[in-house]
Image: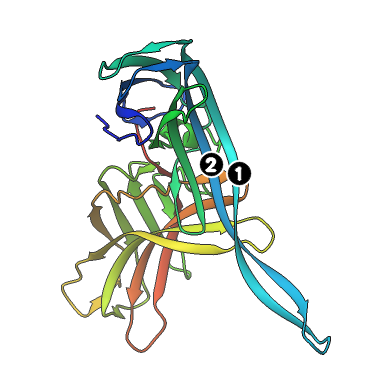
Amino acid sequence: MLNPTDTSGGDWHLELLPPVLIPSRPARLTATFTPHRALTTRGVRASLVGTETYRYRETETSAGPDGTPHQRSVDRTGHEEVGRLEATLAGPGQLTAGAPVSWSWDLHAPDLGPATFEGEVLRCDWELAVTVDVPNAFDSEVRLPVHVAQPTALLAAGVVDSGEYGLFDEAPANVDAHPAHIRLAPVPLCLAQPFSGSVTLETEAPVAVQEVRLELRVHVEVTHRGGLSEEITVARGHLPTGTATFGGPLATHPFTGDPPGEWVPTIDLPHGTARARFHVILARSWSPDIHYERDVALCTTTEV
């Protein structure tokens, strides 16, 4: 239940069920407005709008006082609308001061989203807006951020490429001639749920390690010219070794992970992409770390 407060003529109360929108699934918005004064309205409108935000770098050239050219890099932010739904909730009418009135909107999030993505250099944000159109005065409007989930079905159908082995339970992770596999469950991995897995490997001889780290990383790349990139580590853990060495003969090492929680699913947007990899890292003190890694698809709901 959502309770934003309006500052232009009344109080709002919004209820969205379910609170997270799932592409192709029905949802219902109930908006209740209590005007501070009597109003004549031209109607009530609602909208759901998705906006991509992306960051990129440009080089600017300018001339100094003596005509010498100077160059500098400037970070810029771009925006593009990626989805929109609109509805008329009511026609012209009269509202009584202090008397609440409610309107409902049955909506479906767009079948292909895109899903909410909350990175630094790349974002996809969705916002609900309900507006009471008041002639010759400021409209009364409420805006509310909402989340749109990335469902398992879209990833499983290959709508978004998640890598060669992103949709496999078990995937090879060789770094040398010795076998190594990483298993994850569920696949796609859901950012809202716990997960489990195992790494099966052998090494020529036991490896001296400080620790064996587990990391789920999302690589984000803005594909616009001069686009920036980032790597987001959304989950960290450790494999208990019990000794100062790890590896040797072929063995399977199980692990579990808590729900990562972040809204950074596998996604394609008009100006950017996000892809995930799971890393098993043998951290060594005087030598480069050894990385076993594999592709993994990330969703934010397993309901569909």
Q: Nearer the viewer, residue 57 or 283?
A: 57
Q: Which residue is mark 1?
A: 80
In the image, taking residue 109 as reference, residue 144 lies left or right, namely left
Residue 139 at x, y percent in the picture? 46, 28
Residue 253 at x, y percent in the picture? 25, 60
- Which is more N-terminal, label 1 or label 2? 2
Q: Which mark is residue 117?
A: none
Q: Which mark is residue 51?
A: 2
Residue type, label 1 = Glu
Q: Quick one: quadrant of the N terminus? A: top left
Q: Nearer the viewer, residue 76 or 119?
A: 76
Residue 301 at x, y percent in the picture? 35, 35
Location of residue 55 by image quarter: bottom right
Residue type, label 2 = Thr
Q: Nearer the viewer, residue 140 or 80?
A: 140
Callouts 2 and 1 close, C-beta under 8 Å: yes
The chosen color scheme is rainbow
Q: Nearer the viewer, residue 241 or 158?
A: 158
Q: The residue tagged with tag 2: helix, strand or loop?
A: strand
Looking at the image, residue 82 lies above or below residue 90: below
Q: Residue at x 77, y 85 (%)?
A: 64
Neighbour tally class for label 1: few under 14, some 14-19, many 20 plus, Cα within 10 Å: some
Location of residue 31 by image quarter: top left
Q: Residue at x 26, y 75 (%)?
A: 211
Label 2, label 1: how far apart the Cα atoms are: 6 Å
Looking at the image, residue 255 lies above or below residue 208: above
Total marks placed: 2
Residue 207 at x, y percent in the picture? 31, 79
Neighbour tally class for label 2: few under 14, some 14-19, many 20 plus, Cα within 10 Å: some
